[in-house]
């Protein structure tokens, strides 16, 4: 008996050509997701391992769907096996969870031969991600962190107001080590660098100020 014929018979209606096609399409879509994740990542430390996990998840999901689609007994056993799986690694960024589900959905679609759903759906999701990434840079402000042994609060407020488009006092902390003041600020886009340099120089010239930091953030810092 020919080996390929045996494989085909044991796989029901699933042919070798179909399996290869499903896996190739899944790989292409997964690589696209890999690229989008890398290009739209805005965190501090990019994790290649997590990105590879998304790719592998898509491939494994496609294999599972091909098994489920050809054998009812195996599909029931697979459901039972998956029900006892527990993920031990904590995913802190909700965005990463979204990408993981995207990878699973791509594997589900391509694994069942729904290539158009996998391709068009992935293109739409990627387009939305790039649009919101661009708007993110426009929407999120900066944090101004000023530390020192003595800080003139009114003088600091005047400097911030004169060099920013919007500002809001987020925190003022006084301790034995000194005073820490945090402002949420937003610059005028076309004058951001000039405004930032002027503001930092003026604050550093204040008596008692030892540290001045301007930090871009994504709205995730509590205060």
Image (spheres, rainbow, N blue to C red):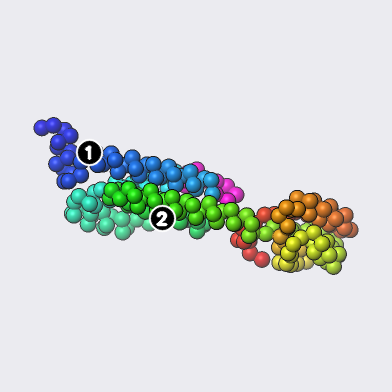
* Circles 2 and 1 in contact, beta carbons < 8 Å: no
Q: Residue at x 30, y 43 (%)?
A: 22
Q: Which label belongs to residue 16?
A: 1
Tell me which corner region of the image, top left, top right, bottom left or bottom right, holds residue 160. Answer: bottom right
Foreground disc of the pair 2, 1 = 1
| Position in image of residue 132 (x %, y %) | 55, 56
Q: CA distance from mark 2 to mark 1?
A: 27 Å
Of residue 7 and residue 136, the one placed in the foreground of this image is 136
Q: Residue at x 71, y 55 (%)?
A: 189
Is the magenta region chiefly helix, strand or loop?
Answer: loop
Residue 211 appears in the rendering: no
Question: Where is mark 2, residue-wise?
Answer: 101
Q: Which label belongs to residue 89?
A: none
Mark 2 burial class by Cα count in 10 Å: few <14, some 14-19, many 20+: some
Of residue 150 and residue 136, the one placed in the foreground of this image is 136
- In this picture, residue 5 sits left or right of residue 114: left
Quarter of the picture holding the N terminus: top left
Q: Which residues are magenta?
A: 41-51
């Amino acid at each position: 008996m020919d080996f390929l014929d045996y494989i085909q018979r044991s796989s029901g209606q699933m042919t070798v050509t179909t399996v290869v096609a499903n896996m190739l399409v899944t790989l292409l879509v997964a690589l696209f997701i890999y690229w989008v994740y890398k290009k739209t990542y805005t965190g501090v430390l990019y994790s290649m391992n997590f990105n590879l996990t998304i790719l592998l998840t898509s491939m494994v999901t496609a294999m599972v769907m091909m098994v489920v689609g050809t054998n009812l007994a195996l599909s029931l056993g697979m459901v039972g096996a998956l029900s006892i799986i527990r993920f031990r690694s904590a995913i802190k960024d909700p965005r990463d969870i979204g990408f993981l589900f995207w990878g699973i959905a791509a594997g589900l679609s391509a694994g069942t031969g729904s290539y158009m759903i996998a391709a068009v759906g992935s293109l739409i999701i990627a387009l939305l991600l790039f649009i919101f990434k661009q708007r993110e840079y426009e929407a999120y402000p900066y944090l101004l962190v000023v530390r020192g042994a003595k800080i003139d609060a009114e003088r600091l407020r005047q400097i911030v107001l004169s060099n920013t488009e919007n500002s809001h006092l987020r925190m003022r902390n006084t301790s034995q080590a000194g005073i820490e003041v945090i402002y949420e600020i937003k610059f005028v886009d076309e004058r951001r660098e000039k405004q930032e340099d002027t503001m930092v120089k003026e604050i550093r010239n204040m008596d008692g100020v030892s540290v001045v930091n301007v930090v871009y953030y994504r709205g995730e810092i509590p205060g």
